[in-house]
Image (tube, rainbow, N blue to C red):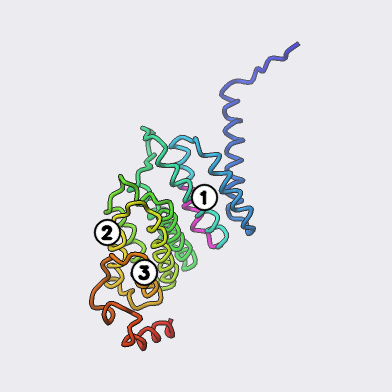
Amino acid sequence: ETVQDTTHPSRKRRVEFGVADAKLAALYNDLSDDVKATRLKAAADLIRTLADADSEALDKSLTRLIRGLCSSRKAARSGFSVALIEILKLTTKSPATGVEGVNLTLPAIIDRIVSITQPEEQSNNKERRDHLTGRCFGFKSLIQSQLLFAKDASVAQWEQVLDHIFKLATETTWLRRECGVTLYETLATLTQIKDLDIEYVNLLVQRLEPFKLSKTPEGLAIWLTTSTLFPDAKLPKGVWNHNDPLSSKERGTVAKILRDN
């Protein structure tokens, strides 16, 4: 004789949601594991779990992942970054909904990275450092997701992200190297974009001088890489002799930049 399940449907849903939430919590926990293989598996499992998720679930995941970038642990930032890149890509496949507070548009994602990583006024130095480092990693993930370079994306949003990164690099000296590496690696990302508008490259390299980063190790690397990968890019004028940091007349300057940093 078959025993009927008399569990109320609403209770069943609560149990199902509870199990799903516990699974997600375990995956987020594994994203910060010290073992790289564990982090990568957690990221892959999270992406599979949310592949067909609705916009509300993706919205919650974005918030959780951006918060995870503000961890003081390098392993956590690495794991959450990998997952965030892929979840950001999923947002383009999720239809817009009328759910209050859910906004997966590119401008909203940029604003969310800024707001979640904004240190509170009473934050101590460590907390401030963790949050602003998280901001740098948040924009790094957004760049690597390539959403900023989609056909329906605005160049203005690219400029907004660049300004945030350059501002971090100049106003927070201990983040200059991390921001510089992010911008340097961005050039490699831009080479992967089909039919790239060279203006994206120009907007990046033209910011080196107004933000006073041209004559830093990071700026030097960005300049040389830009001239190699994008020979048609418009490099700032009047910075280097014949626009070439490797000019014989610039040897002393370059040596000083590398020695003093």
Q: Nearer the viewer, mark 2 or mark 3?
A: 3
Number of numbered tags placed on the structure image: 3
**Percent position of residue 258, x then y:** 42, 82
Q: Quadrant of residue 8?
A: top right
Label 1, on which residue?
83
Do the CB atoms of the residues marked 3 and 1 lie less than 8 Å apart? no
Task: For mark 1, give the secondary structure.
Answer: helix
Q: Nearer the viewer, residue 136 or 245?
A: 245
Q: Which residues are magenta?
A: 63-73
Label 3, on which residue?
228
Label 2, on which residue?
199
Which callout, 1 or 2, points at the residue further toward the start of the chain?
1
Q: Would residue 127 appear left or right of 200 to someone viewing this image? A: right
Q: Give, as a three-letter code, the residue at label 1.
A: Ala
* Cα–Cα gap, marks 2 and 3: 16 Å
Q: Please tell me which residue is depicted at 45% across the width and 60% down the height of the picture.
A: 131
Q: Residue reaching furthest top?
A: 1
Q: Give, as a three-letter code, the residue at label 3.
A: Thr
Task: For mark 2, give the secondary structure.
Answer: helix
Q: Please tell me which residue is depicted at 36% across the width and 88% down the height of the picture.
A: 252
* Cα–Cα gap, marks 1 and 2: 29 Å
Task: For mark 3, give the secondary structure.
Answer: helix
